Amino acid sequence: MPGVGMADALNVAMSGRTDRPALLFVHGFGCGQAMWRHVAPAFEADHRVVLLDLPGSADADPSTYDPVRHASLQGYADDVLRVLDELALDDVTVVGHSVSSMIGVLAHIAAPAVVTRLVLVSPSARYLDDGDYRGGFGPADIDDLLEMMNRNHLGWQTPLSGMVAGAGHDEARLELDDTFCRTHPEIAAQFAAVTFRSDNRADLEQVDAPTLVLQVRDDAIAPMSAGQFVSEHVAGARLVVLETRGHAPHLSDPLDVVAAIGEFLSVPAPT
Amino acid sequence: MSQHPPEPVPPEADLFQAAPCGYVVVDNTGTIIRANAEFLRLVGEPAGDIVGVRTLPSLVSAGGRILMETHLRPLLERDGVVREIALDLVRLDGVRIPILLNARVHDPATGVYLVVVLETRDRHRYEDHLLAAKQAAEMAGEQAASLAATLQGTLIPPHPPAIPYLDIHALYRPAGSGREVGGDFYDVLQVGPDAWLVVLGDVSGKGIPAAVVTSFIRHTVRSLAIAHPDPSDLLGALDEAVRAHGTDHFCTLVAVRLERLRGRWDLALALAGHPPALVRRPDGTTYELGVPGTPVGLMTQPEFCTVRQALDDLAVTLYTDGVTEARSPDGMFGDERLVELVGRLPHRPTAITEGIAEAALAWQSHHASDDIAIITFAAS
């Protein structure tokens, strides 16, 4: 987008102390940066806190989504690095939820001096089962997800046939409807497919940064086996198990999440 | 008032149990902490295997589980309510039960929420059909667009062949995005040792039906051309064939036979309801050539008339009404503007053809509302 930076286009919000290291919070598949509202403010006292909406999600400018670039998680990681470059931030801790934990991993591998620490919240390096590996899902489950998304275009109650509606129709809706968990149906379907069919297991070995893995004991999307795999394949990773259920501990148990991240950050990085 | 015996269960609990929909109370971990009879009937399990044991997400299909965790829980946590979510419960035996689900946070402090589910098997079948129909319609639309593009590719007239002693330049520009098959066409073919036929026409209507007729006309012209050296005879034979074809589409066209005799080109031209040829003299003055005639395939008593003249040093331009009827907020491009433009252009077929197309496109801000076909030729 000429004239508009990636940071603006991805609805970047910054708060906290400009003289302190940066924490970048990246939401996962589903809803936007507001997912972090119970967690991120706790770090404003001693960090620069940065939030964004991923391309295609929530309030990100629609033009930021490119079906070709975003056909792989690397495209998202490149966008995250462009934002950090524009903001002239380095030595950044990326806190990524779910699929964005792998986006954080890829960003770190591409720019290890920029992304220097990783907090992986409910991560999974591969959602599909593969041999002995237990991701928790089979290929048919991903088709089922796409079918369920097709049935529930949340916030996008488009007419029966998209062919009837002109571009102006959707633009009008954009201003009326709440954008928190809203993604254009086609983009959401592609993001879902890219997310749940990705395999980042081999990338984990390349991580060379202090890493915290936050794993929920009973997570319907990223089971214990997925979090354990991540923590076992990132050298020196620390695994913290949250004794709760669900895939969004930053919503269900924000205090525990804040405490775990706070403790991780208080350990000085090896020089 | 008679004295009621003390009730063993509070009436609210009765209402909960007897609610004519599946009704569960869920804690903030997703665990079902109460379930009514209809809910247990839907999942086909005893209360002991559900209450305090299973989470609600674990009872829906895998895709629905992801949707719940990634979308519904966040929405519910923020807004306190979600409505009309279409999911499938999956029973132990694998049977799927389509449901509509509403949820409301009961106690924001503990995160406990209430969920009702309604079985929608019949309605769901109907919606599945609608969805399938919608997807089929969209797919058909894409296929039609792709077919149109393919067909268009076969209909775009080829570059004219190289003709000794003749300089000829043709151009075809489809309307709009170029995805719709248009009805304009041209063709240049050899009909004798030193004789060539140039036709340019415009089939009424748009889309596949018009494209079929366009294709038919081009092939018919080719098959009739040698047996009908006189252009008006050719148009007569073509008219008969088009009417026999039984199409509702008609066609305007111009047919020109060019024959090189004793080192000079003679031309014979006939019109079928088509704009006349625009003839340019080297000094930039122009005149129209041709007797109007009737469109091919339209009248029971068609009339065509051949006019003849020497080509000499003239440049002859054939065009479709996509040029003169190009529209802008200032009106149509029109004949006068075309004549004035051609007068200013260099006296060369390439310059005249390209110059006309450029001006007609610029006139309508480069979004052509109709096809444009142009051919200019001159002796070389």
Image: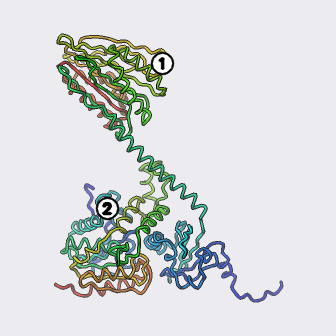
Rendering coords of residue B113 (x, y %): 54, 78
Residue ID for mark 1: B299
Residue ID for mark 2: A71
Amino acid, disc 2 = Ala
The Cα atoms of the two marked residues, 1 and 2, are separated by 57 Å
Is residue A106 shown to the viewer in this render? yes
Rendering quarter of residue A223: bottom left
What chain is tagged by disc 1? B
Q: Residues within 10 Å of mark 2 (few under 14, many from 20)?
A: some
Give the residue at x 69% y 86%.
Answer: B9
Give the residue at x 24% y 30%.
Answer: B354
Foreground residue among B172 and B41? B41
Rendering coords of residue A163 (x, y %): 45, 48
- Image quadrant for the N terminus of chain B? bottom right
What chain is tagged by disc 2? A
Amino acid, disc 1 = Met
